[in-house]
Image (tube, grey):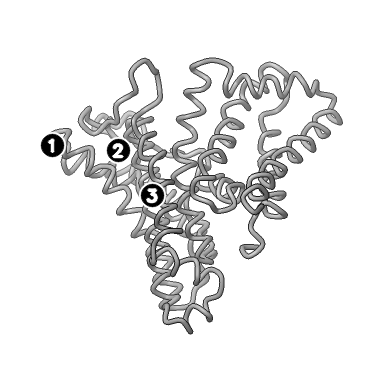
Amino acid sequence: MSWIRATLQPLAAVFVALALSGVLLAMLGADVGLAFGALLGGAFGDALAFENTLVRAVPLLLVGLGISCAFRCGIWNIGGEGQLYIGALAATVLSTRLLSDAPGWILLPLTLGSGALAGGLWGGIAAALKVGRGVSEVLSTILLNFIAVLGVAYAVQGPLQEFSNAYPQSDSFPEAARLALFPGTHRVHTGLIPALLLPGLLWMLMFRSAAGLRLRAVGLSPEAARYAGISPERETIRVLLLSGAFAGLAGAIEVSGVTGRLFENLSSGYGFTAIAVALLARLHPVGVIPAALFFAALASGSGAMQRVAGVPSVTVQVIEALVIFLSAGFALPRSER
């Protein structure tokens, strides 16, 4: 059955990647059992480790959703990292400069909304270049990543730098613009709620609506879609706006729920890792949830693996690369390769 195959193929990709990583660790002289035990313990070993994994999973999940819907439309959006940064920048401008004195009932929604809007518009630049000038979205989104990251670096050293000028970072978000923590937790913020709800909404959009049918039709065959009266150009614009909005929201949630301020190197490569998340999920919105949790667990457990087993944390990047390679090889739907 197709759903069984769709479930087993990503699991097989993960299993083979971990097996190959184990062989690599053994060749390096490491204790494989100790290393993987430490990796698992660092990700799920206690309540705090699990909280760290959940917090890391939120941006991966949101950016992964955006990338998966773009890929479904045949648009290779590699710009999730830049869209995340722009979303965080917009949220910071609004909450620390423009509306810092606004009450929480309006400031928090506007902070998150501004991030989503800015990320969507940033993705819209790539859409305009592709539709208007025929520029490959792969090229434009990659270059826009650099512009966004450097733009944030300029902002926190210039117009957005904290008033004390002590560090290259923005002022702290006002309490009204901060996402609350779940009771009894130290780090898990309420940004987890939209992160868990949006996959279901995106699934309904993609598979239970005419708009989703148009997006998927363009991804399967732009010419056939055009023959059916669907404009690939219009769908390109829509999906890049939507994809960028997911990443922008992730950036806004990151500064509002985790860091509380904007600074350089805000993201640890969430936008790029989210590509692997989307591939491992086979571009399915709901499948993005376990895929994001898996990569978040790798990131959370890498430090413990280094401390306990003496294995360089960079080994986790090797595991991620193997999962990406294997996902593209046989976990990704045949029509999307």
Dot 2: what SS? loop
Q: Looking at this view, is 306 or 205 the one in front?
A: 205
How far is disc 2 from disc 3 in space, using C-alphas? 37 Å
Please name the residue that numbered disc 3 is placed on: 201
Disc 1 residue type (three-letter): Ala
How far is disc 1 from disc 2 in space, using C-alphas? 21 Å
Q: Residue at x 68, y 41 (%)?
A: 11
Q: Is residue 9 left or right of residue 238?
A: right
How many tags in the picture? 3
Instruction: Pinpoint residue 288: horizontal percent, then vertical percent.
Output: 52, 44
Please name the residue that numbered disc 2 is placed on: 161
Task: First in sequence, mark 1 or 2: give its number.
Answer: 1
Q: Residue at x 50, y 59 (%)?
A: 77
Instruction: Pinpoint residue 308: horizontal percent, then vertical percent.
Output: 69, 16
Please name the residue that numbered disc 1 is placed on: 102
The image quadrant of residue 195 is top left
The answer to whether the residue labelled 1 contacts the one labelled 2, judged by CB atoms less than 8 Å apart, is: no
Q: Residues within 10 Å of mark 3 (few under 14, many from 20)?
A: few
Dot 1: what SS? loop
The relative height of residue 172 versus residue 281 in the rendered view (above or below) is above
Foreground label between 1 and 2:
1
Q: Residue at x 48, y 42 (%)?
A: 61
Disc 2 residue type (three-letter): Gln
Q: In which quadrant will I find the C terminus?
A: bottom right
Residue 89's disc number = none
Foreground label between 3 and 1:
3
Q: Is residue 273 left or right of residue 116?
A: right
Q: Residues within 10 Å of mark 1 (few under 14, many from 20)?
A: some
Disc 3 residue type (three-letter): Leu
The answer to whether the residue labelled 2 contacts the one labelled 3, judged by CB atoms less than 8 Å apart, is: no
The answer to whether the residue labelled 3 contacts the one labelled 1, judged by CB atoms less than 8 Å apart, is: no
